[in-house]
């Protein structure tokens, strides 16, 4: 295979809702490009994409598939992405390492939630978009309705380049208003017949052609002047205008295909090769120092590894983009993240599980390597002349979590090793060993996302696991001041233990004044602050510890031990064993023994005095509250809102966005446990949501009582 230069390479992400036909389109593109000799079928489980067993089992894409085709002396690197929102990480990864997005639309259903989500990602990342309407041979397809939907959602930037003469089982003809030609196919597709546009369609085609010319001219002053002078543009000028319009997101061209019969796919490839922006037409990528790195083939060599695939009999396959310079087979590079040297003994370009050996790849190109000793997803490899470090992919927050453990507890270590390896393949599978919850938690994007993980563990690794509801990370705090004292005394022959601590606790808030005078049971306690420790807590909030002991009743050397005892109780609150937060502790008196007092005595006295005071200080349980945004079709708005209110949600606002309604709410984490499943069921899979931690708020009193009783029952059992 020839070495393609930066100005001959185009990187494209293939996106769209589940069922839009991305895998089938991939087969047609590879067939048209001569990479495969025969198109595979999903039902036959022989496609280039979806070649992993779990994908063949479910009939869904789970991983992004990297492939390439050659067209008119250009190299098109294309990444076919899963359509399900549960695998959003793959789509975001692909968009970050490519320059243009093809958004495939199922002609039967038009805009679906996956299309909307993927378009939002392109908007956030500023990527050009081509809309591609597929399945024109379906009885339910209505191209005009789909086009109307696109225009209603994305405005006048939506400009059709093609339209079908008719849709349904008899579909076989497209009118191309860029080339002003008619394309038609036989019943089984194949090479098209290209003819002049019939007189009956000429008025419509001319009108659409003029709209396309005007849209192309808008993005270049010279072209605009020519358009005003001549009322038209040449084919090359239109291509240049469309390229600039694409690059600036000033226009979204609409194409048509019937991927299942390979109709229109060859023409799409021509457009991609001739019009889509090249790698060097698009902005460079910032490194972690904020410097923009352009894909310069003459610059120092930097590779960014964006994906890991684990394949039987091969092991890890590491996919990378050449960010700068050139890489050759046998190059020795430095891994910035790991501090290790790495030799790239073999270089390949990809077509799914098929790999083609190459000797060199230049800036902007995408390739892969195998048997690397110490490279992980997200790593940067450099030559000795550069210190670039890339970290530009931001993954969505998790939306579905489960506690996980092996059926056979002896396999815990094996399970953790496999889970960490799977995180390399999909960084949105996040594994957390929670000291607080005393559970291993696996976080993902939805129920299907974690079900896929379970299937792979049990079928590929023969490692049987079970999911459980994760515990909720509650917090405990206090609402009023309280006083307590505790004497720890122990005599068992020889040296004994003695320590007595008197303390006051109260709710802490930022900027509160120094303690002065307290009254409990008609008795006044005056404070004289000797020292203050402000301790930011790992789990949020603060502990403020004040030494107010006068007269030497407790030696200063015992204060750290008292603090240690208080911290031990903060880590396991008295109400539910949850972390406590936002408490100020004032130690004001106590007693010690000249022989028997030691650190352990004061630690235990401090812990027990704090525990007693905490229970008398109006203790409250706090629960985590999340900001939730739900994107829902308008006809399902009432059902979704009712369901949220049943989850103790507070609706904060509503708005319309690109044809969908957006609901904003604050919802307790406890109520979000299976929300992704419920939302999918309520809306037939047409809605999506995001959630981000907001704050801790007091739980209702009835729920607090229930939580305390559950904790006490558990303590009694143990």
Image (tube, rainbow, N blue to C red):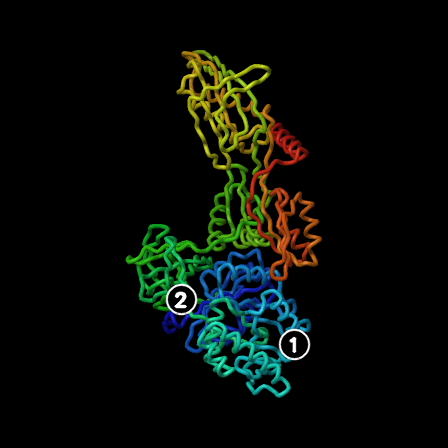
Query: Residue 150 at what x, y percent from top left?
Result: 60, 68
Quote the CA–CA distance across marks 1 and 2.
38 Å
**SS for callout 1:** loop
Residue 20 visible? The answer is yes
Please tell me which of labels 1 and 2 falls first in the chain: 1
Query: Residue 192 at what x, y percent from top left?
Result: 55, 83
Query: Residue 249 at what x, y percent from top left?
Result: 50, 66
- In the image, which disc is placed on residue 32? none
Foreground residue among 375 and 153: 153
Query: Residue 606 at what x, y percent from top left?
Result: 49, 22
Q: In the figure, 75 relative to 200: above or below?
A: above
Q: Quadrant of residue 661?
A: bottom right
Disc 1: CA contacts within 10 A as few (<14), some (14-19) or many (>=20)? many
Foreground residue among 401 and 645: 645
**SS for callout 2:** loop
Q: Quadrant of residue 697?
A: top right
Disc 2: CA contacts within 10 A as few (<14), some (14-19) or many (>=20)? many
The answer to whether mark 1 and mark 2 are in CB contact below 8 A is no
Foreground residue among 217 and 714: 217
Residue 466 visible? The answer is no
Name the side, left or right, on which 674 lies relative to 518: right
Residue at point 50%, 75% (across, down)? 216
- In the image, which disc is placed on residue 167? 1
Q: Quadrant of the N terminus?
A: bottom left
Q: In the figure, 342 relative to 273: above or below?
A: above
Name the side, left or right, on which 394 lies relative to 402: left
- The residue singled out by tag 2 in the image is 365
């Amino acid at each position: 295979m020839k070495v393609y230069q930066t100005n001959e390479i185009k990187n494209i992400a293939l996106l769209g809702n589940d069922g839009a036909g991305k895998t089938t389109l991939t087969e047609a593109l590879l067939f048209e490009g001569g990479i495969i000799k025969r198109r595979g079928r999903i039902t036959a489980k022989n496609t280039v994409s979806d070649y992993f067993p779990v994908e063949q089992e479910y009939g869904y894409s789970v991983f992004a598939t990297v492939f390439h085709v050659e067209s008119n002396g250009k190299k098109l690197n294309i990444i076919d992405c899963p359509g399900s929102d549960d695998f959003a990480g793959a789509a975001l990864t692909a968009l970050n390492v490519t320059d243009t997005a093809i958004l495939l639309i199922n002609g039967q259903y038009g805009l679906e939630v996956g299309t909307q989500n993927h378009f939002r990602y392109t908007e956030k990342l500023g990527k050009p978009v081509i809309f591609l309407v597929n399945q024109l041979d379906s009885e339910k397809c209505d191209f005009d309705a789909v086009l109307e939907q696109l225009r209603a959602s994305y405005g006048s930037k939506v400009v059709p380049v093609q339209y079908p003469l008719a849709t349904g089982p008899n579909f076989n003809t497209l009118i191309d208003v860029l080339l002003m030609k008619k394309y038609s196919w036989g019943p089984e597709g194949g090479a098209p017949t290209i003819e002049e546009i019939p007189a009956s369609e000429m008025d419509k085609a001319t009108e659409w052609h003029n709209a396309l010319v005007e849209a192309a001219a808008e993005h270049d002053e010279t072209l605009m002047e020519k358009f005003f002078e001549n009322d038209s543009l040449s084919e090359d000028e239109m291509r240049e205008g469309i390229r600039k319009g694409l690059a600036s997101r000033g226009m979204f061209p609409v194409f048509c295909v019937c991927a299942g019969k390979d109709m229109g796919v060859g023409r799409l490839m021509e457009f991609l090769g001739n019009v889509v922006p090249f790698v060097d037409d698009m902005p460079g990528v910032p490194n972690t120092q904020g410097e923009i790195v352009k894909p310069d083939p003459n610059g120092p060599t930097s590779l960014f590894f964006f994906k890991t695939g684990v394949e039987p009999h091969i092991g890890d396959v590491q996919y990378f983009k050449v960010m700068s310079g050139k890489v050759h087979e046998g190059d020795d590079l430095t891994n910035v993240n790991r501090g290790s040297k790495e030799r790239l003994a073999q270089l390949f370009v990809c077509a799914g599980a098929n790999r083609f050996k190459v000797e060199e790849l230049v800036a902007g190109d995408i390739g892969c390597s195998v048997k690397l000793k110490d490279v992980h997803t997200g790593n940067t490899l450099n030559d000795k002349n550069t210190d670039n470090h890339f970290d530009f992919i931001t993954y969505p927050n998790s939306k579905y979590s489960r506690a996980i453990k092996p059926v056979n507890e002896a396999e815990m270590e094996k399970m953790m090793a496999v889970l960490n390896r799977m995180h390399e393949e999909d960084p949105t599978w996040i594994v957390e060993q929670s000291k607080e919850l005393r559970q291993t938690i696996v976080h993902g994007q939805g129920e299907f996302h974690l079900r896929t993980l379970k299937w792979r563990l049990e079928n590929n690794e023969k490692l049987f696991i079970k999911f459980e509801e994760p515990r909720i990370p509650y917090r405990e705090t206090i609402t009023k001041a309280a006083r307590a004292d505790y004497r720890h005394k122990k005599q068992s022959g020889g040296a004994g233990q003695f320590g007595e601590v008197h303390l006051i606790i109260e709710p802490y808030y930022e900027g509160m004044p120094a303690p002065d005078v307290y009254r409990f049971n008609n008795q006044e306690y005056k404070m004289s602050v000797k020292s203050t420790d402000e301790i930011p807590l790992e789990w949020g909030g603060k502990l403020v510890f004040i030494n107010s002991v006068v007269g030497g009743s407790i030696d200063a050397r015992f204060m750290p031990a008292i603090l240690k005892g208080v911290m031990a109780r903060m880590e396991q609150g008295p109400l539910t064993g949850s972390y406590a937060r936002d408490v100020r502790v004032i130690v004001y008196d106590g007693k010690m023994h000249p022989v028997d007092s030691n650190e352990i005595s004061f630690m235990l006295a401090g812990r027990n005095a704090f525990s007693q005071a905490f229970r008398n200080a109006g203790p409250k349980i706090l629960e985590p509250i999340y900001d939730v945004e739900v994107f829902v079709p308008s006809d399902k708005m009432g059902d979704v809102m009712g369901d949220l209110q049943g989850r103790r949600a507070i609706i904060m606002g509503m708005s319309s966005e690109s044809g969908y309604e957006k609901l904003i709410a604050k919802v307790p984490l406890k109520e979000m446990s299976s929300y992704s499943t419920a939302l999918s069921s309520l809306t037939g899979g047409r809605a999506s949501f995001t959630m981000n931690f907001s704050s801790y708020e007091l739980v209702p009193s009835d729920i607090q009582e229930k939580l305390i009783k559950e904790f006490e029952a558990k303590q009694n059992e143990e």
